Amino acid sequence: MIPSSPAHLHVAALSHSGMTGKINEDRFAVSSFNLGPDDPRPAVFAVVADGIGGHRAGEVAAELVVNYISQGVAESNGKKPLKILENAIHNASQAVAVRSATGMEHEGMGATCACAWVVDRKLYIAHVGDSRIYLIRDGQIRRLTIDHTWVQEAIEKGILDPERAREHPNVHVIRRYLGSGRLPEVDFRLCLEEGEDDQKANGNQGFEMGPGDTLLLCTDGLTDLLWDDEILKTLDSQPDVNAAAEALVEMANRRGGHDNITVVLISVPSPAEVVRKKKGFVDWLRREH
């Protein structure tokens, strides 16, 4: 793929260490491309990772994950997004596992990841762990991913009430992550409706985004402290994606900010914005690194 600038979508990203003095073990990256000389379609790729492990090991793991996945996507031809994502995530997981074996300070480290790849307006996602991807459309919010956690399994089995999940002592027990001895199973379910089976959710890949649609990628430092409806209300109350990213992080910190907080927002411009851009009246892309 060919790097390009500016992106064809609104993009904003923000990461904060939180309010407890904890080292920021979250990482993110956002890149924009054209698919190639013979395929000029624009693309935006975003990944967030939440590191696992003490003594700065989580920071190292998250950095490796973001770098390896971003590189795998950038060096691809973009023709088979899901296969490209799977290979990139597996390569990242192997890199973390190899580094973990090099010394005691990195032993047992790992990371989650959540990836969103928008080719023109077609959305492809992949994730491992409990970092999430949301779709905001027509005044509603929809979580596209399913957490790979003990709590989520308990909810699905009817053992635990979703309303009490946050208070459970196993709330942060992750069942799947990058850096373990075995390659993680990459989750390609893109959940658009309640009750979808796995086959239907997997078949939603390539979902066509529309004007005004917004994606939110985030780590659990946000979702531990804000309910989905609060995220929606905050996004709806802000004038653009930059202000929205700042407002989400600020709200999580006001609630205690007990963990690192990372958000990436990707929004499809409205038709009116595209017309204004073509006329040269405004620069509709505001991007924060």
Image (cartoon, rainbow, N blue to C red):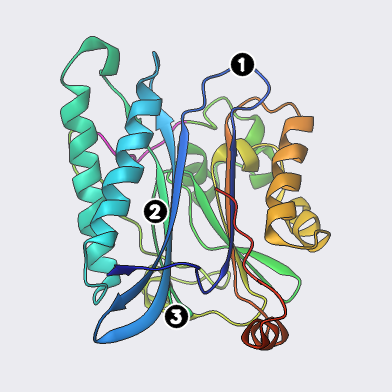
**6, 21: nearer the viewer:** 6
- Per the image, the residue denoted by label 1 is 21
Q: Secondary structure at mark 2?
A: strand
**107, 11: nearer the viewer:** 11
Q: Amino acid at mark 2?
A: His
**For the point 60% across and 75% down, which residue is it?**
268
Residue positioned most to the right: 237
Q: In the displayed structure, does residue 134 sit left or right of residue 225?
A: left
- Per the image, the residue denoted by label 3 is 120
Give the crowd class for mark 3: few <14, some 14-19, many >=20 residues within 10 Å. Answer: some
- Per the image, the residue denoted by label 2 is 127
Give the main secondary structure, helix, strand or loop, of the magenta stretch: loop
Quick one: quadrant of the N terminus? Answer: bottom left
Q: Give the image location of residue 275, x and y in percent.
A: 67, 89
Q: Which tag, 3 or 1, sits closer to the chain's start?
A: 1
Taking 102 as reference, is 177 above or below it? Answer: below
Between label 1 and label 2, give the one nearer the viewer: 1
Q: Give the image location of residue 160, x and y in percent.
A: 59, 41
**For the point 39% across and 18% down, which residue is it?**
56
Q: Amino acid at mark 3?
A: Asp
Structural distance between the alpha carbons of marks 1 and 2: 28 Å
Structural distance between the alpha carbons of marks 3 and 1: 40 Å
Judge whether residue 165 is colored magenta.
Answer: no
Taking 247 as reference, is 64 above or below it? Answer: above
Q: Which mark is residue 275?
A: none
Q: Magenta stretch?
A: 173-180
**255, 34: nearer the viewer:** 34
Q: Secondary structure at mark 1?
A: loop
Q: Give the image location of residue 190, x and y in percent.
A: 45, 68
Q: Which quadrant of the structure image shows residue 49?
A: top left
